[in-house]
Amino acid sequence: MTERAAVSRADLERRRPTEVRQVIREGRWTGNSKRLALGCEQANIAILPERHAFDFMRFCQRNPKPLPLIDVTDPGDPEPALSAPGADIRTDVPAYRVYRDGEAVEDLTDIRHLWRDDHVAFLTGCNLSVDQVMLEAGIPLPHLIREEAWPSQYVSSIRCRPAGVFHGPQVVSMRPIPETLLVKVIGITGRFPRSHGAPLHVGDPAGIGIEDLARIDWGKPNAVGPGEVPVFWACGITAQAVARAVRIPEMITHKPGHMFVTDLPVIDPTRDAA
Amino acid sequence: MTERAAVSRADLERRRPTEVRQVIREGRWTGNSKRLALGCEQANIAILPERHAFDFMRFCQRNPKPLPLIDVTDPGDPEPALSAPGADIRTDVPAYRVYRDGEAVEDLTDIRHLWRDDHVAFLTGCNLSVDQVMLEAGIPLPHLIREEAWPSQYVSSIRCRPAGVFHGPQVVSMRPIPETLLVKVIGITGRFPRSHGAPLHVGDPAGIGIEDLARIDWGKPNAVGPGEVPVFWACGITAQAVARAVRIPEMITHKPGHMFVTDLPVIDPTRDAA
């Protein structure tokens, strides 16, 4: 076996998504996907047996803010052909989280041994895709700059619309935003509905059932400084909160923050014209 | 039984969608849905047994130009709760067309006797929703003015992306547009992806496999006059062409042109913010 060179986040920022996925497939990157293949849409993944797939697809269609559908594979086919031709959803995610009966039981970097002919993979949009757009527009987002930082994620009191066996709370991600930039932030993110779009809520966390911003459910704590306001977007981790809520027998997801990198450009003026 | 007053298209133009659906449910309107409940999205419908529903939903997700998903009902539930709460998809469409083994076998105005517990209704976007926007923007669309006129619809050589058992050609609708208004028409319709968005093709019909504009597959012939260019949009009748192509055992659709009227506004500045 040949020795493989170490790879850094800086190396992966400017690589093409096919190259990034190859590095991940080889086990050379198992970290979070922040800034990987900048400019490409990243996706949450949820792998379910076919018997739950139609329910889950309706669930996504009815809840497009937390779960904007990007791609759905054919049963047993590990290639997300619409968003990442040639990719393999069993190996190309930096880290996976396996749920059994609604409990997270295992984190893995390869799930080929778990894959079955009745498995269907759902890819849904992700905030990380737009964070870079915001940063370049002058919005300070420390989690894109500081390696150890991350948005704060919470289970909110906003309920999803149910579909079949699926129901549960919406998860939100919070970024502190200077009040002077609030209109700009809402305007920018509203243009990216495939990446959760405009915020769900701005201001008092109690308004969406969050009693204490320090008590995060996922991510990292973020202090809200003077002149800043907490801004909450829908978050794809909603699928994992729903897996818990309904005690779903089996769901394989990405480990939060460790997203699948698609070939789709975040900014695509030809999307509708194509 | 009390005598019911006759109802005209002009009566129904300014009515709310719930009122229009009630009139249709009572059997008082079985005509096409042109201009009904102006300003509300109209939808193509395709009703399939659950065993084909997940395949068809992936098929729609992969072909958003002809089949932009608006709503999908739960198996056995005739209410499109997302787009038209309180409606009944078995009675609220002006006319239905029933396909068996890929052949259109019957047109009906009520399908309650055919409805089963395993039936799923798919609602997908429609060009009629945006035609009025174009008309108000100064685009001459004679089919909105003249009662007997209609866009011309053709089976094209553009193929759908397959999903499960579903594959087949895309159907397009053609409107002759003055060349001087072409940029405007493309710009306007591109803003309505849920209603097929920007055109698929402009100009020479042979470029998308249409040899003779006079040989329509659905709709009415439309002469392309001097200074006009034929403009082709994706069309929801694609589902019916696909039913034929795969000889699907059972699909119940609307009769072309006889769409389901939803509560959703065509122009909704709050859609993403909601």
Image (cartoon, coloured by chain):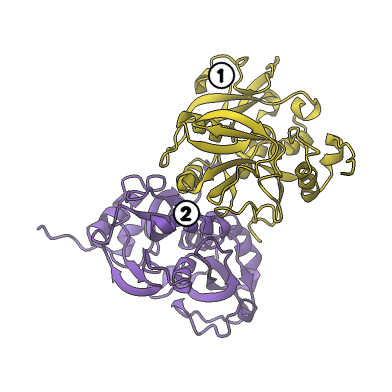
Chain colours: A yellow, B purple
Q: Is residue A194 visible?
A: yes
Q: Amino acid at mark 2?
A: Phe
- Horizontal and vertical percent position of residue B121: 38, 55
Residue B195 image offset from top left, x and y in percent:
51, 58
Task: Determine which quarter of the picture holds residue B158.
Answer: bottom right
Disc 2 chain ID? B
Residue topped by disc 1: A204
On the image, the x and y values in percent for residue B17 come to 35, 51
Chain that bears disc 1:
A
**Residue sitting at 49 percent across and 84 percent down?**
B215
Name the secondary structure under disc 2: helix
Left or right of A73 on screen, residue B116: left
Mark 1 secondary-structure assignment = loop
Mark 1 burial class by Cα count in 10 Å: few <14, some 14-19, many 20+: some
Q: Is residue A215 above or below residue B58?
A: above
In this view of the protein, can residue B42 be seen by the observer? no
Say which quarter of the image contains residue B9: bottom left
Query: B126 and A154: which one is in front?
Result: A154
Q: Position of residue B99 (x, y in %)?
A: 36, 70
Residue identifier under label 2: B54
Q: Amino acid at mark 1?
A: Asp
Exactly how many numbered labels are in the figure? Answer: 2
